[in-house]
């Protein structure tokens, strides 16, 4: 059970990561930005590693809350096929580019840092699995011939669209761009190359 | 014209970014890691901003050298259609996951930093255009109905595959995974939903 103060510290750390990057995230900067007495963040998370893990935990919690509602929608949309699926996924992506933009940047900062910190890697990969596993079930139901690989591909594609729009050089896609792109990827994965016997 | 020393400084900065992140890249750390007398990096790039721009310039140079040979290959492969295109693109991606792995991580560090530094954003976006423009020509030749959007999608997809494999939670794709994934995306973009009139 996390205290209200721990939540404030973690939310502040997410904002600092987004606005100032890894160099801007320090225990002291969190205290200041959160308006807490000096030492408060250190009391909650003694080491830098502990602070990063607390931040990733909170980010995961926030992203799962968002993703959960998407998965419920997807279940309902499945019967109507790939176009509906693309529509719903595009809506979830749109949030990552707009309201969830700072969370998105903070997540990329943590992902990069995880290449250097095994303890963060383990935590990050656990979250990854949460996001990947339902995809396999959805794609199996949608008739994919290779649901594990296809699920990975969809995650990679959406990750790339978001990365490109938020931190890369890509033009900001419109919701319609997202929907059409996802529909095309799904179509390419789900159809048979030659439907005639 | 860049001096040999500037090249050494930039190459060292790329490695530091990959191995230690933005926090680990300082003028002093570059001097030490490159075996240069203290102050050498400051002499070449006075400010942090100048050091980051020098590093991005060098990274761009190295990535364009790699991408150029891919583009030549792609031109030759075009007549043979989407499968060949996917094959060649997969080979280029494979390099980013293996021999070019540190460069890939350094590029992501700079992309994230560019969200906070307008001068780096401008430089980064200029590189992005270099990588995007030939894609539009290739996709037009391949019969795309929407080459600009499709080119962006391919860049985003490949970026996502690489990001996911190098810093995300994704399993490492095999060269064959890359080839099949790209072929599926191209198929979904290039076929007409209903080929019968």
Image: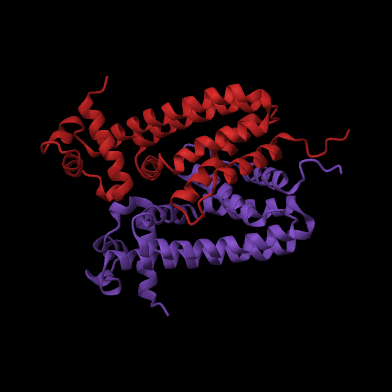
Chain colours: A red, B purple
Q: Position of residue A55 (x, y in %)?
A: 30, 35
Q: Is residue A89 above or below residue B187?
A: above
Q: Is residue B173 left or right of residue A1?
A: right
Residue A62 in percent (x, y) is at 38, 30
Identify which residue, A103 or B170, lies in the foreground: A103
**For residue B151, which quarter of the picture?**
bottom right
Indicate whether B45 appears above or below B140: below
Whether residue A128 appears in this view of the structure is yes
Q: Who's the residue at 49% across and 40% down the image?
A: A94
> What residue is rendered at 43% in x and 67% in y?
B58
Residue in the picture at 50% in, 35% down: A92
Q: Which of the pair B166/A197 is nearer the observer?
A: A197
Specify the quadrant that holds the C terminus of chain B: top right
Q: Quadrant of the N terminus of chain B?
A: bottom left
Residue A26 vertical placement versus A46 (above, below): below
Residue at the right extreme of this rendering: A197
Residue B122 locus on image (x, y percent): 42, 64
Along the viewing direction, whichever of A98 and A22 lies nearer the viewer: A98
**Can you tell which quarter of the image residue A31 is in?**
top left
Q: Is residue A50 visible?
A: no
């Amino acid at each position: 059970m996390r205290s209200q103060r721990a939540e404030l510290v973690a939310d502040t750390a997410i904002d600092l990561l987004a606005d100032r990057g890894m160099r801007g995230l320090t225990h002291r900067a969190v205290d200041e930005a959160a308006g807490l007495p000096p030492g408060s963040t250190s009391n909650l998370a003694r080491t830098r590693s502990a602070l990063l893990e607390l931040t990733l935990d909170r980010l995961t919690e926030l992203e799962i809350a968002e993703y959960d509602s998407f998965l419920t929608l997807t279940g309902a949309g499945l019967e109507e096929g790939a176009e509906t699926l693309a529509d719903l996924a595009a809506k979830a992506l749109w949030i990552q580019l707009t309201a969830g933009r700072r969370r998105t940047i903070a997540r990329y900062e943590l992902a990069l840092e995880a290449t250097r910190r095994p303890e963060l890697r383990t935590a990050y990969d656990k979250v990854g699995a949460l996001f990947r596993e339902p995809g396999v079930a959805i794609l199996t139901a949608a008739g994919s011939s290779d649901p594990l690989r296809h699920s990975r591909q969809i995650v990679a594609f959406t990750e790339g669209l978001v990365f490109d729009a938020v931190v890369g050089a890509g033009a900001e896609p419109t919701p319609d761009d997202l929907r059409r792109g996802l529909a095309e990827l799904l179509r390419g994965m789900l159809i048979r190359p030659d439907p005639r016997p």
